[in-house]
Amino acid sequence: MKGIVFTEFLDLVENKFGLAVVDKIIQQADLPSQGAYTAIGTYNFSEMLSLLQHLSEHTQLSIDDLLLTYAEHFFAVLANSYPGLIDKYNDPIELLSSIENHIHVEVQKIYPDAELPTFEIIEKSDSKLVMIYKSSRAMYSFGLGLMNKTFEHFDSSAEITFEKLVSDGTEVKFSIVKTNG
Ligand code: HEM
């Protein structure tokens, strides 16, 4: 997992819960990197899982809730860092249906070691998108947060529902229906 995902995560934890909580979860998580991340480095996904587990215990918020909130913050980071990738689109459904064959393809060129999910499109129209998320990291709540912010970015809104196809969250079917914009 790319370092930028860790550095932004720890920044957000610091803003929301304070530096003492950052120190505490880094200590408890017993990390090979010792919590010293650089944005361009690459680290084990298990470190993120361990940080999330300890933050979840500390805050009494579920890992899914934490990932959802984190993704809503991360969208702004992506939009600022890669404006060229997002500016190509003028519609949220067009953007979301292009993650697999354009956006993440470009990300993989920039970071050859990025670990990305796949999105298989099942149904697509101007106002509806059904796609299946697959990833061993089971970060579907992170995907949901990015989807929410994608609609907000285009001053649009949607009703997004999902269904786990595998109980551990490694395969999740998303149904996205645009409600305005
Ligand atoms: C300009 C737009 C985007 C950029 C530049 C981008 C880039 C990235 C990067 C750098 C990572 C981390 C990879 C790693 O740590 O190895 C990532 C992960 C991820 N991205 Fe994107 N992304 C974009 C848009 C989206 C959108 C709109 C979604 C919405 C569904 C999405 C879904 C995900 C998910 C779910 C992950 C977590 C990894 C996993 O589940 O396996 N991305 N993306």
Image (cartoon, grey):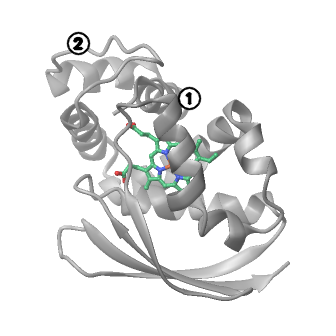
Q: Amino acid at mark 1?
A: Asn
Q: CA distance from mark 1 to mark 2?
A: 20 Å
Q: Is residue 69 above or below residue 175?
A: above
Q: Amino acid at mark 2?
A: Gln
Quadrant housing the C terminus: bottom right
The residue singled out by tag 2 in the image is 34
Q: Residue 52, located in which quarter of the rendered image?
A: top left
Q: Picture coordinates of residue 12 (x, y %)?
A: 52, 32
Q: Is residue 154 above or below residue 2?
A: below
Q: Residue at x 67, y 88 (%)?
A: 125
Along the line of sight, the residue nearer the viewer: 153 or 25: 153
Q: Earlier in the sequence, mark 1 or mark 2?
A: 1
Q: Would you say 97 lies left or right of 21 here?
A: right
Q: Picture coordinates of residue 24 (x, y %)?
A: 27, 22
Q: Secondary structure at mark 1?
A: helix
The residue singled out by tag 1 in the image is 15
